Image: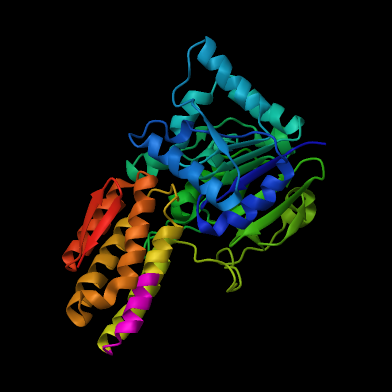
């Protein structure tokens, strides 16, 4: 039996992926689970990212995950051997957000590629998401350099593990259906159609692109030669500009990507969106913020205090649900700003005494933020409550609230 290679397009520490994580952990049994911290090792808040991720897995799956420190390549010696030993004993190896090219500089020409291959040979799970997922193929998108810095579109060499692990000459692109750009195209891991069309002809003739949508997992089982799609989105096969899309819940044989049917796959205008699935959580804190704000505004115009409080409580719950998410975006700031605005307007509409249920929830959220070392959120919640006329003072016995 061989292990599983799991690739997540995004949302690796979001509420949307709790169910897939639980299912995948069942495959691992009680074997150790480790987080490899390399992709975000260059960030000043790397410790906080690790802490939030560990808390997420503990809260959402009940599993204890330990961190293997490989932020920079350790020199030969005891620390390096300890890190490798921990990786080699794990039944679940995870890496996620950050920079793919930074991670590649720390992993290339080290033991890491062989460790990942060995993991599958001993029936472990290798789960790489977002930036880490980009490193696995023969060709990697240097997303920071292209999207943030403005470098000319060009592939970077990857670890080239997908083909030996699965037999598929696939180039993995996470964040495939990204829509953060609004009016400008940020699909295909922020490349957009124009830049992806520039890069695609540079791939080897037998290669193809496999795009994993956001908040979606592609579970590759080399022993069964199948891939299963889980989560909110789908999986796209793209070859020479033509695409074929499969939704969540699909179980595909590897021949779906390499057989004659795949070679002549029709090309829809863009990968088809998944059908509405009301039982699935929203795919971003931004979407939850927009929904809560829209309802709050309607209730405020109607002078419906209870409705306003309910909308604000829903936003508070969304912020709590997404507190462990390690994705880097401005959605947290948007949510904090929206909640502050709600509190200020509610204070003038209803008086602070009627806000007691909301204030209680916000104090609890602030405590969770402090435990997660999210100081920005903690401070923002305190400031928002002060703006509504509510003082929060931290004491050894806990926070004291004064109206």
**Residue in view at x 24 percent, y 75 percent:** 353
- Asked if the magenta segment contains residue 312, the reply would be yes
Residue stretch rendered in magenta on the structure = 302-313
| Foreground of the two, 182 or 228 | 228
Q: Where 57 sits versus 247, above or below?
A: above
Query: Which residue is farthest top?
Result: 77
Colouring: rainbow
Residue 146 point in image, percent of width and height? 39, 42
Using residue 371 as the reference point, say whether residue 279 is left or right of it: right
Q: Residue 293 occupies which quadrant of the picture?
A: bottom left
Residue 323 point in image, percent of width and height? 41, 53
**Residue in view at x 44 percent, y 40 percent:** 51
| Foreground of the two, 286 or 238 | 286
- Asked if the magenta segment contains residue 91, the reply would be no
Q: Let me know if residue 99 appears in the view.
A: yes
Using residue 359 as the reference point, say whether residue 352 is left or right of it: left
**Residue in view at x 32 percent, y 79 percent:** 308
Using residue 367 as the reference point, say whether residue 193 is left or right of it: right
Q: Let me know if residue 294 appears in the view.
A: no
Q: Residue 284 occupies which quadrant of the picture?
A: bottom left
């Amino acid at each position: 039996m061989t292990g599983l290679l799991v690739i997540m397009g995004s949302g690796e520490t979001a509420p949307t992926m709790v169910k897939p994580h639980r299912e995948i952990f069942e495959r691992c049994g009680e074997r150790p689970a480790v987080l490899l911290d390399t992709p975000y090792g260059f960030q000043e808040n790397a410790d906080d990212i690790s802490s939030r991720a560990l808390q997420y897995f503990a809260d959402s799956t009940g599993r204890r995950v330990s961190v293997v420190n490989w932020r920079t390549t350790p020199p030969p010696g005891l620390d390096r051997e300890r890190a490798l030993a921990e990786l080699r004993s794990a039944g679940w190896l995870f890496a996620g957000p950050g920079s793919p090219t930074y991670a590649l500089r720390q992993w290339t020409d080290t033991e890491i590629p062989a460790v990942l291959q060995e993991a599958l040979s001993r029936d472990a799970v290798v789960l790489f998401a977002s930036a880490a997922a980009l490193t696995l193929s023969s060709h990697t998108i240097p997303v920071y350099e292209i999207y943030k810095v403005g470098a000319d579109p060009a592939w970077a060499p990857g670890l080239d593990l997908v083909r030996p692990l699965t037999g598929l000459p696939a180039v993995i692109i996470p964040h495939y259906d990204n829509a953060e750009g609004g009016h400008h195209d940020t699909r295909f891991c922020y490349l957009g159609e124009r830049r992806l069309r520039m890069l695609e002809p540079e791939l080897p003739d037998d290669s193809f692109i496999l795009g994993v949508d956001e908040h979606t997992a592609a579970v590759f089982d080399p022993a069964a030669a199948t891939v299963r799609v889980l989560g909110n989105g789908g999986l796209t096969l793209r070859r020479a500009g033509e695409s074929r899309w499969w939704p969540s819940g699909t179980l595909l044989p590897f021949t779906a990507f390499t057989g004659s049917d795949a070679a002549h796959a029709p090309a829809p205008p863009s990968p088809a969106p998944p059908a509405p699935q009301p039982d699935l959580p929203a795919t971003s804190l931004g979407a939850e913020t927009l929904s809560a704000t829209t309802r709050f505004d309607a209730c405020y115009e109607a002078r419906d205090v209870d409705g306003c409080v309910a909308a604000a409580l829903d936003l508070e719950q969304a912020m709590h649900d997404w507190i462990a998410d390690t994705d880097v975006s401005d959605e947290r700031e948007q949510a904090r700003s929206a909640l502050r605005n709600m509190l200020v307007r509610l204070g003038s509409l209803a008086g602070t005494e009627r806000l007691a249920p909301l204030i209680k929830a916000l104090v609890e959220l602030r405590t969770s933020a402090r435990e997660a070392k999210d100081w920005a959120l903690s401070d923002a919640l305190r400031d928002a409550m002060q703006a509504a006329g509510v003082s929060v003072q931290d004491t050894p016995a806990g926070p004291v609230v004064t109206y």
